Image (tube, coloured by chain):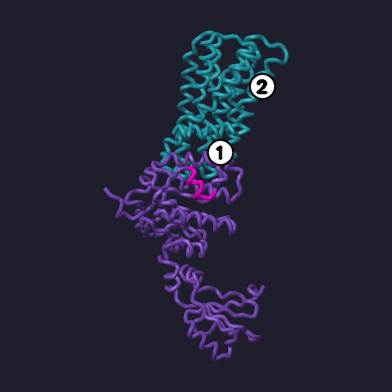
Chain colours: A purple, B cyan
Amino acid sequence: MTQTHCAAVSFAGAVKTFGAVRAVDGVDLTVEPGETVALLGRNGAGKSTAISLLLGLIEPDAGTVRLFGGPPERSVRAGRVGAMLQEARAVPRVRVRELVAFVAGRYPEPLPVARALALAGIAELAERRVDRLSGGQTQRVRFAVALAGNPALLVLDEPTAALDVEARHAFWASMRGFARRGHTVLFSTHHLEEADRYADRILVVDRGRIVADGTGEQLKRSVGGGLVAVDLAGRATDGLERLPGVRSLEIRGDRARLRTDDPDATVLALAALGAVRGLEVAPASLDDAFLALTASEPEPLTSPATEAL
Amino acid sequence: MLDYLRLEVRRTLRDAGFVIGGIAMPVLMYLLFTNLGAADGSWKTGAMVGMAGYGAVGSALNTGGGVAEDRAIGWLRQLRVTPMTPRQVVVGRALTGSVTVLPAIVAVLAAGGLLNGVRLAAWQWAAIAVLLWLGSVPFTLLGLGNGYRLTGQTTGVANMACNLGLAVLGGLWFPIALFPAWLRSVSAYTPTYRFAQLGTSVAEGRAPAPGAVAMLAFWLLVFGSYAVLSYRRSGRAG
């Protein structure tokens, strides 16, 4: 039996409820081998539950979850999966090398320990005690633990939560180094830029469902619309939010930023008002796309008073 | 599995709390109890077995504290996404418990032989060590039961309560001959009293009483079931 034509990950109608909450509410998704895929969603959107299902830590109430064509547990036991779980803390009283070597030793074809440490950027911490490292260093140790077994599928649940900007960049450089070796990587995040910059494909998760699936570019285009900004030049802001196409208005200092479904119509209406000083039209950002995809009711207009602060 | 055992034993021995509370304390208490005031040879021997047993019980229960800690920090969850099976993890933990009771037993017996002049035949030393080692298994299971069921902090408290309560009731600290009659009859049913009895009968040159073995086997069953139930419950809770 060959694994070549099997998807690395496939969900079909997967449902998981906790009491009255449908944390994962009918998810279908496929990740092909070699892809780097982001699960993008707010906190509580169902990303971690989806990942627990994927790893076989919990069972779906309905539907199926498969890894490499079989139940998740089979792939986990066969050493095809490495994971960095959310909210795991440092393992006390163990050295970095001991920990990574132990985990590597559980897998059939692990990376050499030195290699795993180097990929995670912690070669110089090998002899340090894990519980005496900084938060960013601990995060990297957990990354090294996840990739030590040289798994075909690497799963990272919110891997950069609690990292500062610099540590975050270093982390993603490491992740890319691993993905380039032909591994499948699936990570969850609530940072739009991270998903856009580091994933081949973004799955937007909201309320337990996949609401969009595509590259960052595709998501932006699917939403359409854009951002129109003009200088107020002392003009009152009343009525701007009622111009054609406008979905929301935001005042920043002396500048009005209008999110619009129809930039052309909005610009023409602004021109009719004579409000074109410093006119700027930008395509929808991934932020806009994300908000449009995950907002259930029309977005409330941002209060100028709070924005002016 | 051996790697897991090695890793966890190493982690336990690096725990200052374990080394002080589980090894140094029983030795110190033994030396204090037997050298303050008049102490005859039989008390020195009896207390040696009792304190070795007390150290072994503490170390065995400590295994459960480790489990609770590993659950809290997500280490057990991390192990579940490696190729290790849950069974290997549990058995590895239980074996860790049975290895980490040895330092306490050896240390107290050494204090008895080297510092307190306890004289026994070579086979008696060996038999006492082995019996205390084997007899500590029920306590490891009790600790695991607590560790899989309770949170880190409550496990610590529960283990401490089990340790002190069972040690005092079972006559590991003071011989139960000093107890009032009603308390003595309670002691006879405790696993700790029967546990120490394994060692004291050997020290007196006799084979362990069938009653002691039967009572310990009963507790082994009770604590074993408790550990299995707790483990299943923790598995469901994810």
- The 10 Å Cα crowd at callout 2, few under 14, some 14 to 19, many 20 or more, is some
Q: Nearer the viewer, mark 2 or mark 1?
A: 1
- Image: A107 above or below B174: below
Labels 2 and 1 share a subunit = no
- Whether residue B186 is visible to the viewer of this picture, yes or no, is no
Q: Nearer the viewer, residue A144 or A60?
A: A144
Residue at position x 58%, y 29% in the image: B162
Choose between A242 and A284: the one closer to the eye.
A284
- Coordinates of residue A168 in the picture (x, y in percent): 55, 57
Q: Is residue B128 above or below residue B219?
A: above
Residue shown at the point (56%, 38%) measured from the top left: A94
Which residue is pictured at 51% across the width and 57% down the height?
A: A173
Residue located beneath label 1 in the image: A94
On the image, the x and y values in percent for residue B222 come to: 47, 28
Q: Secondary structure at mark 2?
A: helix
Q: Position of residue A8 (x, y in %)?
A: 36, 54
Query: In the displayed structure, does residue B84 sit left or right of residue B124?
Result: left
User: What type is the residue that disc 2 sits on?
Assistant: Met
- Can residue B45 be spotted in the picture? yes
Subunit bearing disc 2:
B
Residue, far right: B37
Quadrant where the C terminus of chain A sits is: bottom right
Determine contact: label 2, label 1, CB under 8 Å.
no
Q: Secondary structure at mark 1?
A: loop
Q: Residues within 10 Å of mark 1 (few under 14, many from 20)?
A: many
Residue stretch in magenta: A113-121
Q: Could you tell me which chain the residue with mark 1 belongs to?
A: A
Residue A114 in magenta?
yes
Q: Which residue is mark 2?
A: B29
For this rendering, which residue is in front, A145 or A19? A145
Q: Main secondary structure of the magenta part?
A: helix
Q: Spot the residue most to the left.
A: A1
